[in-house]
Image (cartoon, rainbow, N blue to C red):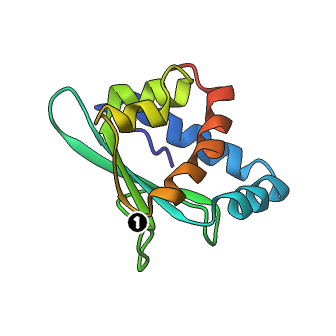
Amino acid sequence: MSLKNDAFPSSTAFDLISSSLGASEAERKDAIKKGGAVFAFTLKNSSGETDSWYIDLKEKGVVGKGAAPEGKKTDVTLQLSDEDFGKLVAGKANAQKLFMSGKLKVKGDVMKATKAEPVLKKAQTKAKL
């Protein structure tokens, strides 16, 4: 099942992250060890619509649609535009600069937000956004 939403072009990154986590058991366990949190991403597109995805790096090492895995809470929610998320995943934007300029909002544990970067980097190697 694809996680892509056509109204959010950068959402293809969630499929790439999901496939990189599913590539091997060792990769997934490594990502869970490094991540240790449930990350939610709420993106806003140019039409002003919002949609959410999550990456569970606390227990299962999976990516899904929605604000959180069923029956669970997120540790950190990152809110940014679809365009900025696309740049972030493609390696054309820096999360700290987006945060400092107010383009990336973080709710929850800010320190855990920094642990999402290695997983996004996995998508960078595959992304052609």
The image position of residue 91, as x and y in percent, is: 56, 24
Whether residue 37 is visible: yes
Please count the marks in the image: 1
The image position of residue 63, as x and y in percent, is: 54, 55
Q: Secondary structure at mark 1?
A: loop
On the image, which quarter does residue 40 sit in? Answer: bottom left
The image position of residue 87, as x and y in percent, is: 46, 24
Relative vertical location of residue 78 with respect to residue 84 in this rendering, above or below: below
Which residue is situated farthest in the left direction here?
48
Relative vertical location of residue 16 with respect to residue 79 in this rendering, above or below: above
Label 1 amino acid? Ala
Which residue is situated farthest in the front direction here?
100
Residue name at image x 71 percent, y 52 percent: 22
On the image, which quarter does residue 20 sit in? Answer: top right
Residue name at image x 56 percent, y 65 percent: 37
Residue name at image x 49 percent, y 44 percent: 2
Q: Is residue 109 left or right of residue 45?
A: right
Categorize mark 1 by other alpha carbons within 10 Å: few (<14), some (14-19), many (20+): many
Q: Is residue 86 left or right of residue 55?
A: left
Q: Is residue 29 left or right of residue 61?
A: right
Residue picked out by circle 1: 68
Q: Nearer the viewer, residue 73 or 1?
A: 73
The image position of residue 100, as x and y in percent, is: 36, 36
Whether residue 55 is visible: no
